[in-house]
Amino acid sequence: MLYPKIFRQLEKVRWNMADDVPWDTFDPALLSDEQARTIKMNAITEWSALPATEMFLRDNRHDSDFSAFMSVWFYEEQKHSLVLMEYLRRFRPDLLPTEEELHAVRFEFDPAPYLETLTLHFCGELRLTQWYQCAAEWHTEPVIQHIYRLLSHDEARHGGAYLRYMQQAIEKLGDDARRAFAKVGVLMASAGRTGQALHPTNLHVSKSLFPNDTVQSRLPDPAWLEHWLDQQIRFDRDWEGKVVGSILKKLSTLLGENFDTVQSLNRYRKTLNAAVAPVVPAAVAGTPAPA
């Protein structure tokens, strides 16, 4: 089991909201209204760890080890929402999310293949690592800068934990796991080409609720994420390159290959798929179906 080891490792580096955030260094002159509003949106987005955890527990009933790890992931992700709300409670109480605004992002996700979902969230953690580091540099108020760096480091550790469960899946399932990881890896490393902010909170997850079936669509300002990335923290091509490079590097180690581009990962994916494709005899391949 991985859970006991990961629990001990994360326990050693866990930060304390009361002692490890320098609340007394707050400088009101360095926090703009624009910046404060983005903190509210981030706090609500982080609250969506609640429905994500419900999804993980439902779709991983076969895996008690991973499900137990959710207790750690859920706790730390909800603490992200809590520390952002605590910041607002202390310094901008007028922007504190309401219980209704938080509850709006709790909805049921459709069942999905658990290996693909694992990979989505692994890549999502790598992306959040960079988003929050970029946000820390954009903000000018020292307390919120410190908080975003704490969150960034947590997301990086979560990505490392997910990677260990991916390795375990390869040991158990072999190429079935590799195909799932390569498939989603190509998708999540292609945000630069698609122009979309590819993260689990911005993907459609419930057919019956479409188009209001993404976490971002249920925020008070559904257009917030794109504006935050493009116009506020300015998560540009260089930052996106860090995300893609991290995904490719981690998957290279995991899959035992050297993926220097998304295209090389996609070629690997196609090779895996070809290995299981049915072989059609040449003499039959061009024969029309009987009338």
Image (spheres, helix red, strand yellow):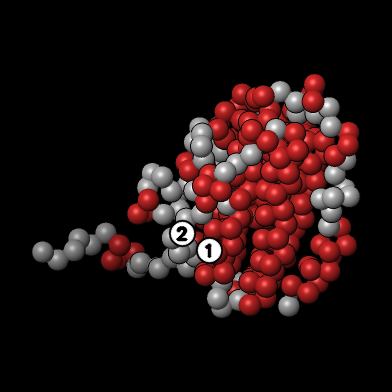
Quadrant in which the N terminus is drawn:
bottom right
Residue underneath mark 1: 55
| Residue contact between numbered discs 1 and 2, judged by CB atoms under 8 Å | yes
Residue 25 to residue 252: above or below:
above
Q: Residues within 10 Å of mark 1 (few under 14, many from 20)?
A: some
Among the 4 quarters of the image, the one containing residue 159: bottom right
Residue nearer the viewer, 42 or 276:
42
Give the residue drawn at x 47%, y 63%: 112
The first of marks 1 and 2 along the sequence is: 1
Identified by mark 2, the residue type is: Glu
On screen, residue 221 versus residue 160, left or right, reads left
Front one among 205 and 181:
205
**Cα gap from disc 1 to disc 2, whole angstroms:** 7 Å
Q: Position of residue 192 (x, y in %)?
A: 58, 35
> Looking at the picture, does residue 217 appear above or below residue 55?
above
Give the residue pinned by disc 2: 108
Q: Is residue 181 visible?
A: no
| Mark 1: amino acid | Met
Give the residue drawn at x 71%, y 23%: 32
Residue toward you, 101 or 118: 101
